[in-house]
Image (tube, grey):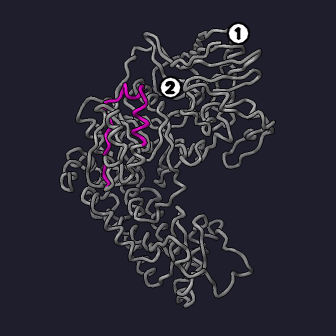
């Protein structure tokens, strides 16, 4: 039988919404994101307490029943089920997220078109928002030449959630998928175009890798106006040995802009401004410089944005670059009373498709609405940019969240679309709340609340900011506490500081940290004295996390009482405790006078040492500044909200760029 691979296409009057795809370059370690074997999911149910549902045991049944990539994938758009095998396309990249299309577009139906050859059945399935699965339709196939099957599927019962997908069951011989696609009838058959904005800082290898990958994607290049590299580093992308070749392959679709380091907000604002000003592109796609793209996601994002009812920001989800079947971030939201970002309600970080299937994970079937999308991959319509402006000059942290909230207030929602994703370093592999970025975490969290919080005085925000200060101080993290206070002092001065600080604050912060022991890092534990305690732990027990409010108050009280006591001389000679980053808890460090603490990246460590006088000084300033922030919150709110249009304007950004360099 003939199995020549065919690229899915649309007929006149049709719009191709989503291709059925297989991993690129025979990349079988990510195969569970594309195909699921029915036989993989056999086995007794097991409770998953972290996700609050019952799931099928991974790799249940005989080990021989698991997927074999070498016999399954026959091309980028093609696959084969062997006789007796059932394969499901109810996978992350190939199921159709029907609820998102029903909610955000005017489509009333979708057409599944498959080209198949061989012997067996094609079964179309759907799910509900509760994760219940039901068969929609099935067709028998028995042919030696490719035949085309169309399934007309309504988009009417997916208000709260649900997906469509299909399964292949080979019976009496192999059953091959030659091509597959989800399509619709629409007058909007012409695709919008995009410019891609990549902000980079001394990651030329990653950045050129991305350019090389994009240069090989004909479908993406067909709707691409320009790739903008905003190079803010000292190790320039153009100096990479591969750059000249890939620039030639992109044939004038690549432009590199050098500017001073203004952080992500400055780099992405430049990309947005250049795209909107040039006026050719419908969209500006923001990409981090250290991501690996699934290029089909770019096409899906543009198609979805073309068909939404109103101009909509379309975001991609984050897969882990280290454990590549793990979906690290499904959707992002801001908890408004706390004013803290995190997983959107009903979602969880770390969904592992190598262990659990889409079908067996009920929460994945609900439609998830988000407040914003991270700028690791985010498609922004240029008419939205012209309407609401560019990023606030936050350097890093909270700039993407603030932009999404501002866009929503202007009538432009953000949709984080399943099946659109990049692989990115997950957050748990770094801890930027303790280095120089601690300043931006605090300042930008508070400033974004001043701009958008619906609660008087930001809800719990000021209290939580003070609690963070106390935890840093009890944990001997004096540099982080100092930077938190600097952030509040700068906020109290008013919004005029934001553009002034976007280029200058980072070197000042780096210099400040050198003054504190908790920021003096070494790359080898042998450079420190060995950990040694004068007295062993009471009854040989390790410190325990406080439980309940009483336990929390008791831990804080005991840690505070310790600050009244002199530091043990032995703690100056040797760290009293060696603390891996995994166990870096304030209540653990509050019980010792010094500790050797390793970093999240596993590359360095610091010797924390208790300084009672510094503790008291920083605590007094913390009380004073948080009280001032509480008193002045209403006036600051008015100042920041009035200044927002100016802070985020192209004119302000152009002036900042001009003042600090080319």
Q: Is residue 235 left or right of residue 420?
A: left
Would you place residue 293 above or below residue 437 in this image?
A: above
**Is 53 in the magenta?**
no
Note whether residue 238 is visible. yes
Q: Tell me which segment is drawn in magenta.
A: 209-233
Q: CA distance from mark 2 to mark 1?
A: 33 Å
Residue drawn at x 69%, y 35% is 360
Q: For mark 1, does the 10 Å Cα neighbourhood hold few (<14), some (14 to 19), or many (20 or more) residues?
A: some
- Kindly state the secondary structure of the residue where label 1 is placed: strand
Which is nearer the eye, 455 or 516?
516
Q: Of the numbered discs in the image, which one, if any, rests on residue 5?
A: none
Query: Disc 2 marks which residue?
Result: 101
Q: Position of residue 389 (x, y in %)?
A: 28, 41
Which is nearer the N-term, disc 2 or disc 1? Answer: 2
Residue 225 picture quarter:
top left
Which is nearer the eye, 390 or 595?
595
Residue drawn at x 40%, y 14% is 187
- Kindly state the secondary structure of the residue where label 2 is placed: helix
Residue drawn at x 23%, y 48% is 653
**Is 221 in the magenta?**
yes
Q: Position of residue 406 (x, y in %)?
A: 36, 43
Q: Of the numbered discs in the image, which one, if any, rests on residue 142?
A: 1
Dots 2, 1 in contact, CB < 8 A: no
């Amino acid at each position: 039988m003939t199995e020549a691979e065919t690229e899915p296409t649309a007929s006149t009057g049709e719009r191709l919404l989503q291709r059925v795809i297989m991993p690129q370059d025979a990349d079988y370690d990510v195969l569970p994101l594309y195909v699921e074997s029915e036989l993989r999911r056999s086995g007794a149910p097991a409770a998953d307490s972290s996700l609050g549902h019952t799931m099928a045991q991974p790799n249940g049944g005989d080990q021989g029943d698991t997927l074999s990539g070498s016999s399954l994938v026959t091309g980028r758009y093609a696959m084969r089920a062997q006789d007796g095998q059932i394969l499901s396309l109810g996978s992350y990249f190939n199921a159709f997220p029907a609820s998102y299309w029903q909610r955000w577009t005017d489509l009333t139906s979708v057409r599944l078109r498959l080209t198949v050859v061989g012997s067996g059945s094609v079964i179309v399935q759907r799910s509900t928002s509760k994760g219940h699965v039901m068969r929609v339709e099935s067709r028998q196939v028995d042919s030696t030449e490719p035949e085309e099957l169309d399934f007309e599927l309504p988009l009417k019962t997916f208000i709260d959630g649900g997906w469509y997908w299909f399964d292949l069951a080979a019976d009496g011989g192999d059953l091959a998928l030659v091509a597959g696609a989800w399509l619709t009838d629409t007058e909007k058959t012409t695709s919008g175009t995009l410019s891609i904005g990549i902000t980079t800082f001394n990651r030329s290898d990653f950045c050129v890798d991305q350019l090389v990958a994009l240069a090989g994607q004909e479908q993406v290049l067909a709707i691409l106006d320009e790739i903008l590299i905003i190079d803010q580093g000292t190790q320039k992308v153009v100096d990479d040995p591969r750059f000249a070749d890939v620039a030639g392959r992109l044939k004038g679709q690549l432009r590199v802009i050098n500017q001073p380091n203004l952080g992500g907000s400055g780099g992405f604002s430049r990309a947005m401004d250049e795209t909107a000003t040039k006026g050719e592109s419908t969209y500006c796609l923001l990409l981090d410089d250290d991501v690996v793209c699934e290029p089909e996601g770019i096409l899906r994002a543009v198609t979805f944005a073309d068909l939404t009812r109103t101009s909509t920001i379309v975001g991609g989800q984050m897969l882990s670059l280290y454990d590549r079947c793990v979906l690290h971030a499904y959707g992002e939201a801001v908890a408004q009373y706390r004013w803290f970002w995190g997983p959107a309600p009903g979602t969880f970080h770390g969904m592992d498709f190598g262990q659990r299937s889409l079908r067996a994970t009920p929460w994945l079937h609900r439609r998830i609405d988000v407040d914003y999308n991270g700028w690791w991959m985010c498609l922004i319509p240029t008419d939205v940019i012209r309407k609401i402006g560019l990023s606030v000059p936050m350097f890093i942290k909270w700039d993407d969240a603030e932009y999404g909230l501002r866009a929503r207030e202007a009538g432009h929602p953000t949709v984080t679309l399943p099946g659109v994703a990049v692989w990115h370093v997950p957050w748990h592999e770094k801890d930027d709340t303790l280095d120089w970025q601690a300043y931006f975490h605090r300042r930008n969290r508070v400033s974004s609340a001043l701009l958008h919080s619906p609660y008087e005085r930001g809800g719990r925000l000021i209290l939580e900011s003070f609690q963070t200060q106390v935890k840093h101080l009890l944990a001997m993290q004096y540099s982080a506490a100092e930077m938190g206070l600097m952030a509040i002092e700068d906020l109290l001065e008013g919004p005029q500081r934001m553009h002034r600080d976007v280029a200058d604050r980072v070197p000042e912060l780096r210099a400040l940290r050198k003054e504190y022991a908790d920021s003096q890092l070494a790359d080898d534990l042998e450079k420190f004295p060995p950990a040694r305690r004068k007295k062993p732990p009471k009854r040989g027990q390790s410190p325990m996390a406080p439980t309940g409010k009483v336990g929390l108050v008791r831990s804080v009280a005991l840690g505070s009482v310790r600050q009244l006591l002199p530091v043990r001389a032995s703690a100056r000679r040797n760290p009293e405790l060696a603390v891996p980053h995994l166990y870096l808890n304030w209540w653990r460090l509050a019980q010792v006078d010094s500790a050797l603490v390793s970093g999240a990246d596993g590359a360095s460590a610091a010797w924390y040492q208790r300084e009672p006088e510094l503790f008291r000084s920083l605590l007094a300033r913390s009380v004073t500044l948080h009280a001032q922030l509480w008193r002045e919150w209403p006036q600051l709110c008015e100042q920041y909200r009035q200044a927002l249009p100016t802070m985020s304007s192209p004119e302000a950004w152009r002036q900042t760029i001009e003042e600090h360099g080319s």
